[in-house]
């Protein structure tokens, strides 16, 4: 039977953990099949995602520069799609320009799948192709998506795209297919390796650092600390979906 | 009986009609094949308007399929004799329409080859998944119902099966309404009024289809519908058309009253170009008011005007569904209320949609499937409604 370590200080790295809880470790070592789950790092191949983690992002609207679309370009490059902006092209992330109707304040922010805790796309999918992983990442199983597009109708954030054309030269880590629906995977293939998302990386590289990726369940993570310290917003919070992507400054 | 009235020439006409139906089914097949090979890029659909004209055809047929069965229910469940005589034809028509509608719905999927997955991976929270169950149940019950009506030894089962069928069809049309009613974020949808609205619309659309087919069958067989029966049925169509108008008006009025919905309503009813035009000219005037005049004006209401009224109701239903399904998606999502937004992905923009020939042909192919099933089954099975004049007159009180 698989078990996970329910240590109350999941922020400790592996070395600290081994040192400080040697008694507990001895117990775990003798129990066959047990997994020492290290929350701060990526998953081993074949290891199930855990609900002890909830991946999310915090986007600082004040740092996001109007006109910069490095996050969008990085997403296209990382996930192997054209980056075209025809109405039939896939766009997993887009820059939205906002103008406050009352004050006239203008700003800009990246919009993508909000990785809801209660995702409407998952509720409506007839075949369970839309699903939420234990660690909060909302994905589409390309093998069982029948292309009904009901999830696109249900998504409050217009975050999903339908693949309208035959696709060639796909990336092996990012399976896609004509006639199926897709959206931001939160760079799940990178996250599972312990890396950050392509958009967050590109934003940092551009010097804006407007996108902060991390574990919302870890009270010591940078994202959790930030969310505790400043006022953040969930887009369409009135829908009660508890999004994994939060915004600051809107 | 039926076969006697067909002369040799009429048989030729019949085969010509079958060939015509088969031709359009073939065109639908070619369209489907192109869509499957190249993807939805050959349609007018895009990431803003993901359900296009095939859904208009499919939903019309599915809603009308359950509505036409209403004729049978009035006979079986509510015991009205003239309608009892029409129950077998109503049953056949509902199977034909559901067959055509489902064919379009399935073949418009991104991956129609995976349709079996819908049965092997069932999501209990999905209204779509419920509908798959409701459609297949409806199909099976309709076949069973026909059997109990057409096989003398099974007649005793006709009433209980008829009751089950009635309950099932109410659920089925509610399910169709719920597909939209459960979409909380789309301003056009997300209303509890939609399931009952679809039920009432189904009454009107189903009866309109029935009138057209019944009149064609009578004319084909050189027979005249009992005037008393015709009068009852045309009055019923009028009542259904009026009730539909009432519910559609209520739906728009409630929306107009909510400030957050006003923008959407003004788009659909006034500013949205093709959508207000189709709504007012297509649905309200041609699809509702004109049929009402044809049905109720003194001196009118004969077979010709009933058929014209029915055809107009059917045309109006396509206009209404186009506005509801495509207009409902064309209006942008309200992701940032209180902000003016724009982006490369259609935020804050009215979605563009021009249906392509392929998707129109797919829809027409579905209608052709329904047409083929209807003309073949009405010829093979004895489904021409036979009225006993006295009974019809007595029931006309």
Image: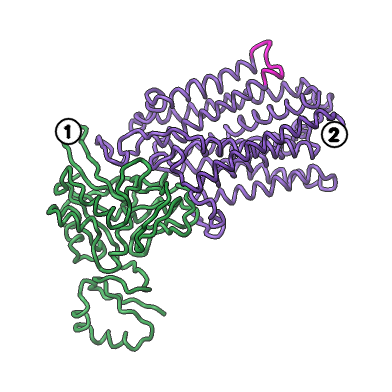
Chain colours: A green, B purple
* Residue B332, above or below A210: above
Give the residue at x 14% y 47%.
A62
Residue lying at the far top of the rendered structure: B299
Q: Is residue A125 visible?
A: yes
Q: Is residue A142 left or right of residue B312?
A: left
Residue shown at 22% from the left, 39% from the top: A98
- Chain under callout 1: A
Main SS, magenta residues: loop
The picture places residue B49, in percent across and down from the top left corner, at 41, 39
Residue B91: image x %, image y %?
Answer: 71, 39
Would you name the residue on which mark 2 appears? B3
The residue carrying pointer 1 sits among few (fewer than 14), some (14 to 19) or many (20 or more) residues within 10 Å by Cα, namely few
Residue at 69% x, 27% y: name it.
B211
Q: Secondary structure at mark 1?
A: loop
Furthest toward the front, the residue is A169
Query: A106 or B241: which is nearer to us?
Result: A106
Q: Residue at x 30, y 60 (%)?
A: A187
- Quarter the N terminus of chain A occupies: bottom left
- Quarter of the picture containing the C terminus of chain A is top left
| Residue range (magenta) | B297-306
Of all residues, the one furthest to the left in this rendering is: A207
> Does residue B172 show up?
no
The reply to whether the C-beta atoms of the residues labelled 2 and 1 are less than 8 Å apart is no
Q: Above or below — where is A16 with respect to A63?
A: below
The reply to whether label 2 and label 1 mark residues of one chain is no
Res. A116 image quadrant: bottom left
At mark 2, the secondary structure is: loop
């Amino acid at each position: 039977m698989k078990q996970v370590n329910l240590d109350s200080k999941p922020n400790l790295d592996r070395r600290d953990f081994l040192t400080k809880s040697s008694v507990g470790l001895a117990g775990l070592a003798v129990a066959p099949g047990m997994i020492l789950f290290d929350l701060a790092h990526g998953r081993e191949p074949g290891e199930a995602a855990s609900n002890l983690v909830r991946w999310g992002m915090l986007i600082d609207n004040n740092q996001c520069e109007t006109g910069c679309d490095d996050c969008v370009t990085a997403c296209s490059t990382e996930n192997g799609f054209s980056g075209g902006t025809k109405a039939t092209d896939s766009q997993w992330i887009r820059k939205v320009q906002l103008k406050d109707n009352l004050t006239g304040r203008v700003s800009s922010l990246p919009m993508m799948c909000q990785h809801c805790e209660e995702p409407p796309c998952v509720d409506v999918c007839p075949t369970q192709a839309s699903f939420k992983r234990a660690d909060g990442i909302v994905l589409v199983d390309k093998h069982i998506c029948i292309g009904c597009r009901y999830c696109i109708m249900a998504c409050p954030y217009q975050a999903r795209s339908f693949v309208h054309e035959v696709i060639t030269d796909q990336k092996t880590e990012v399976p896609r297919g004509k006639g199926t629906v897709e959206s931001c995977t939160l760079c799940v293939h990178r996250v599972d390796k312990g890396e950050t998302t392509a958009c967050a990386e590109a934003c940092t590289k551009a010097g804006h650092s407007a996108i902060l990726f991390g574990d919302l369940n870890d009270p010591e993570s940078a994202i959790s600390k930030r969310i505790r310290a400043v006022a953040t917003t969930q887009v369409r919070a009135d829908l009660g979906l508890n999004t994994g992507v939060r915004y600051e400054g809107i | 009986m039926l076969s006697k009235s067909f002369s040799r020439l009429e048989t030729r006409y019949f085969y010509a009609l079958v060939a015509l139906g088969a031709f359009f089914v073939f065109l639908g097949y070619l369209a489907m094949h192109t869509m499957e090979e190249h993807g939805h890029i050959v349609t007018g659909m895009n990431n803003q308007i993901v359900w296009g004209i095939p859904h208009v055809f499919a939903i019309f047929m599915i809603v009308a399929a359950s509505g036409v069965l209403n004729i049978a229910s009035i006979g079986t469940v509510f015991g009205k004799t003239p309608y009892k005589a029409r129950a077998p034809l109503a049953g056949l028509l509902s199977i034909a329409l559901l067959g055509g509608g489902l064919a379009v719905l399935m073949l418009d999927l991104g991956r129609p080859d995976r349709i079996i997955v819908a049965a092997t991976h069932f999501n209990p929270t999905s209204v779509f998944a419920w509908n798959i169950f409701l459609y297949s149940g409806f199909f099976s019950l309709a076949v069973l119902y026909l059997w109990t009506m057409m096989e003398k030894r099974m007649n005793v089962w006709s009433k209980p099966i008829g009751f089950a069928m009635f309950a099932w069809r109410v659920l089925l049309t509610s399910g169709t309404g719920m597909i939209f009613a459960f979409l909380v974020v789309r301003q056009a949808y997300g209303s509890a009024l939609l399931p009952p609205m679809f039920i009432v619309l189904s009454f009107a659309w189903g009866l309109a289809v029935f009138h057209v087919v019944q009149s064609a069958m009578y004319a084909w067989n050189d027979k005249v519908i009992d005037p008393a029966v015709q009068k009852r049925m045309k009055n019923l169509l009028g009542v259904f058309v009026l009730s539909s108008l009432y519910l559609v008006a209520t739906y728009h009025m409630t929306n107009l009253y909510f400030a957050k919905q006003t923008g959407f309503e003004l788009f659909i009813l006034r500013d949205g170009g093709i959508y207000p035009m189709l709504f007012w000219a297509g649905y309200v005037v041609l699809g509702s008011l004109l049929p009402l005049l044809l049905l109720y004006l003194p001196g009118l209401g004969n077979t010709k005007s009933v058929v014209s009224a029915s055809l107009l109701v059917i045309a109006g239903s396509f206009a209404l569904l186009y506005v509801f399904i495509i207009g409902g998606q064309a209006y942008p999502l309200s992701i940032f209320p209180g902000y003016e937004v724009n982006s490369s992905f259609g935020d804050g923009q009215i979605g563009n949609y021009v249906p392509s020939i392929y998707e129109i042909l797919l829809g027409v192919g579905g209608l052709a499937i329904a047409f083929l099933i209807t003309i073949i089954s009405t010829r093979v099975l004895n489904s021409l409604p036979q009225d006993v004049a006295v009974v019809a007159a007595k029931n006309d009180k």
